[in-house]
Amino acid sequence: MSSQDGSKRLKTPRKYSGPARFITLEGGEGTGKSTQSRHLVSALAVLGVEAFATREPGGSPGAEYIRKSILDPERPDLSALSETLLFYAARNDHLDTLIRPSLAKGIWVVCDRFSDSTRAYQGALGLVSDAQLAVMEKLVVGPTVPDLTLVLDLPAKIGIERAHQRRGDGKSDVFERQSLEFHKKLRDAFLGFAKAAPERFAVIDASGDEAIVRQRIWDVVSERLLGGATHG
Ligand code: TMP
């Protein structure tokens, strides 16, 4: 059913009763991950699914504390391995204090960035080896692998422009300051991960209107995790 403005209306939802799911949103800068995380939580609520949006680095008090240091534009240079260990230290706290306890209580977790960001930023582009990443991943993440990872995909140039607009006059963080070439490689890295593991990933075209992207995401979540119990 469509409303007069052409947008799709929510149909009467079927209630969901199943296990809590862990969903991550990944992608370059300015792709709308945090906005879409919130939309997804609201859409899940319509089905009676308890869910919340969180983010990395950060999400728990300890991890937010580490986030400030990692993203501080004034911070000294760190080796790729040291930087990666900080991301995993934050992730460890986030998993232990928020993500795992929530999933255990049946609450869905929608996380803006997770380990695939580390694989892309510090792995594909930061020169930390796959073997080093595998050790940290096993130690910190273990079996808490996302059920679904949505890669919000945009041409790098558009994403960077959006990120700059969003930030206004504020200072860009250490990663936003990287070159366009860096951001193009980042996009290729995320698309490569998705191609290699299509059962966990879905690539979402993040261009166009926020409401359209929201619907694209909902179609995938509903099909993959809710057995079609859906609105849209
Ligand atoms: P954001 O909250 O604006 O996405 O900023 C987080 C920045 O940190 C972003 O530039 C991506 C980067 N990042 C990594 O380099 N590695 C990671 O593991 C994560 C989670 C984020």
Image (cartoon, helix red, strand yellow):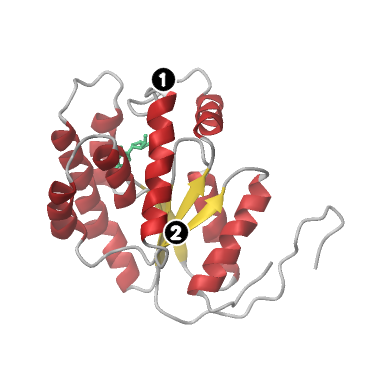
Judged from this view, the residue extending furthest toward the right is: 4
**x and y percentages locating residue 176 in the rendered image:** 40, 27
Q: How many marks?
A: 2
Q: For the point 50% across and 48% down, which residue is it?
A: 152
Q: Earlier in the sequence, mark 1 or mark 2?
A: 2
The CB of the residue at mark 1 lies under 8 Å from ligand 1:
no
Q: Report, in whole angstroms, how far the alpha carbon at label 1 lies from the one at label 2.
A: 28 Å
- Does residue 111 appear to the left or right of 12 in the view shown? left
Q: Identify the disc placed on residue 171.
A: 1
At numbered mark 1, what does the secondary structure look like: helix, strand or loop? loop
Q: For the point 12% across and 54% down, which residue is it?
A: 135
At numbered mark 2, what does the secondary structure look like: helix, strand or loop? strand
Question: Mark 1: which amino acid?
Answer: Lys
Above/below status of 136 relative to 10: above
| Nearer to the camera, 68 or 196 | 196
Above/below status of 9 relative to 127: below
Q: For the point 50% across and 71% down, which residue is it?
A: 224
Q: Quadrant of the C terminus?
A: bottom right
Closer to the camera: disc 1 or disc 2? 1
Q: Identify the disc placed on residue 52.
A: 2
Q: For the point 24% across and 30% down, which residue is it?
A: 69
Above/below status of 157 relative to 113: above
- Does residue 232 appear to the left or right of 76 in the view shown? right
**x and y percentages locating residue 101 in the rendered image:** 28, 66
Question: Mark 2: which amino acid?
Answer: Phe
Image quarter for ligand 1: top left
Q: Quadrant of the N terminus?
A: bottom right
- Does residue 71 appear to the left or right of 208 in the view shown? left
Q: Residues within 10 Å of mark 2 (few under 14, many from 20)?
A: some
